[in-house]
């Protein structure tokens, strides 16, 4: 190969390398911009996890509205029976029991909604933390081992919320109530 060919080959290689470096720089900058955008979104989720107050009110309103419709239908049925038969015996007791049961059901729905709201917020927080850790290359199982915790310890709360029951006790010893 002549000196001119070597110089041409070097120049072509240098030009190709410069193009590749420019492309790599562009990809790096795009990744940095995307990483910053995603990191901001994860941080926003961490700052305000779960449903908004308006969403919570809508969920609660829908669930209690459905309950109200069911009990209104039962109450109307009892009133229709009295009107049809002309006999109001037991109507007061039926009304009282319907009111008590409606209160119990509404209490249960409100309680379950609050649990669901808390679980949603917790899960969104955990997802955001996992997302941030993946952006910055933090291994949660390594983090747990560094802290002297069992690797699955960081996921216990999430597993408990999926199980549907309550766990009592510390560490691996304890007992569960519910699902």
Image (cartoon, grey):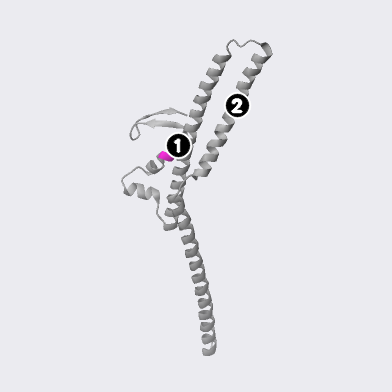
Residues at discs 2 and 1 in contact (Cβ within 8 Å): no
- Measuring from the top left, give residue 121's x and y in whole percent: 46, 43
Q: Which residue is mark 2?
A: 70
Write the residue at 49% across / 29% down.
108
Dot 1: few (<14), some (14–19), or many (≥20) neighbours within 10 Å? some
Per the image, label 1 sits on a secondary structure element best described as helix
Q: Is residue 141 above or below residue 118?
A: below
- Measuring from the top left, give residue 155's x and y in whole percent: 41, 42
Indicate the quadrant where residue 98 lies.
top right
Q: Which residue is mark 1?
A: 161
Q: Residue 121 or 38: which is nearer the viewer? A: 121
Q: Residue 169 or 119: which is nearer the viewer? A: 119
Q: Residue 173 or 169: which is nearer the viewer? A: 169
Q: Farthest residue toward the right?
A: 84
Residue 35 located left or right of residue 84: left
- The residues colored magenta run 157-161
């Amino acid at each position: 190969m002549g000196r001119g060919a070597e110089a041409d080959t070097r120049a072509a290689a240098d030009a190709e390398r410069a193009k590749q470096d420019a492309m790599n720089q562009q990809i790096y900058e795009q990744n940095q911009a995307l990483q910053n955008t995603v990191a901001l979104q994860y941080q926003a989720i961490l700052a305000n996890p779960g449903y908004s107050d308006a969403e919570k009110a809508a969920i609660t309103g829908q669930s209690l509205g459905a309950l109200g419709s069911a009990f209104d239908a039962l109450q109307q049925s009892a009133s229709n029976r009295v009107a049809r038969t002309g006999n109001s015996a037991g109507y007061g007791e039926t009304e009282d029991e319907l009111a008590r049961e409606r209160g119990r059901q509404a209490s249960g729905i409100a309680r379950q909604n609050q649990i669901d709201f808390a679980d949603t917020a917790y899960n969104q927080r955990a997802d955001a933390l996992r997302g941030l850790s993946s952006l910055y290359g933090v291994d949660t199982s390594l983090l747990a081992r560094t802290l002297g915790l069992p690797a699955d310890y960081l996921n216990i709360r999430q597993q408990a919320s999926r199980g549907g029951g309550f766990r009592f006790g510390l560490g691996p010893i304890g007992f569960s109530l519910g699902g």
